[in-house]
Image (spheres, helix red, strand yellow):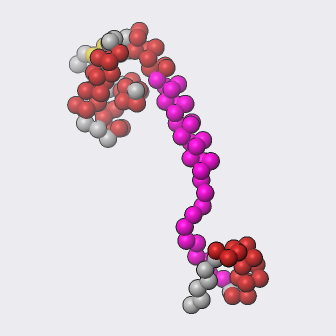
Amino acid sequence: MQTFTAVVEAGSFVKAAEALGLSKAAVSRYVADLERRLGVRLLHRTTRRLSLTGEGELFYTRSKELLAGVEEAEIELSSRSAVASGLLRINAPVTFGIRHLGPLWGSSAVFIRR
């Protein structure tokens, strides 16, 4: 679906291939496989022009909705699990660290004095 929508939005297989970082042959094959799986022709192809069939218009509209929903779900889930982790290095005077930062870290903090 992503490849098909990219072809429709780019207006050509070549431009869609460039946008997706794929070869033109791969893009063409993906769309042909999709048409074969669905059992309908989605695009009218000529050497100069590319246009949607009636089924292609319907499928494009639904594909855009579904892909937007998938993207929205990915963003929602990734934002929920966004927890800071890893090493945090802070350079501060020792007295400031002891007085203000130490109580915030608890026992999991490792102090390295250089």
Task: Examine the rendered structure and indicate whether residue 52 appears above or below residue 9.
Answer: above
Residue situated furthest bottom in the rendering: 114
Count how many numbered circles sit on residues in the image: 0
Question: Where the C terminus falls, by quadrant?
Answer: bottom right
| Residue 77 relative to residue 95: left or right | left
| Residue 34, quarter of picture | top left
What residue is drawn where x is 69% and y is 88%? 94
Name the one closer to the observer, 100 or 46: 100
What residue is drawn where x is 29% and y is 30%? 27
Task: Examine the rendered structure and indicate whether residue 28 appears above or below residue 82.
Answer: above
Question: Where the N terminus falls, by quadrant?
Answer: top left
What residue is drawn where x is 54% and y is 67%? 86
Is residue 15 located in the magenta-colored stretch of the structure?
Answer: no
Task: Examine the rendered structure and indicate whether residue 88 appears above or below residue 78.
Answer: below
Q: Position of residue 91 (x, y in %)?
A: 62, 81
Is residue 80 located in the magenta-colored stretch of the structure?
Answer: yes
Name the one closer to the observer, 34 or 56: 34
Q: Position of residue 9 (x, y in %)?
A: 41, 27
Q: Is residue 10 visible?
A: no
| Residue 77, quarter of picture | top right
What residue is drawn where x is 58% and y is 72%? 88
Residue situated furthest front in the rendering: 107
Q: Is residue 36 visible?
A: yes
Q: Main secondary structure of the magenta part?
A: helix
Q: Position of residue 74 (x, y in %)?
A: 54, 40
| Residue 85 relative to residue 43: left or right | right
Q: Position of residue 80 (x, y in %)?
A: 62, 47
**Residue range highlighted in magenta:** 63-92
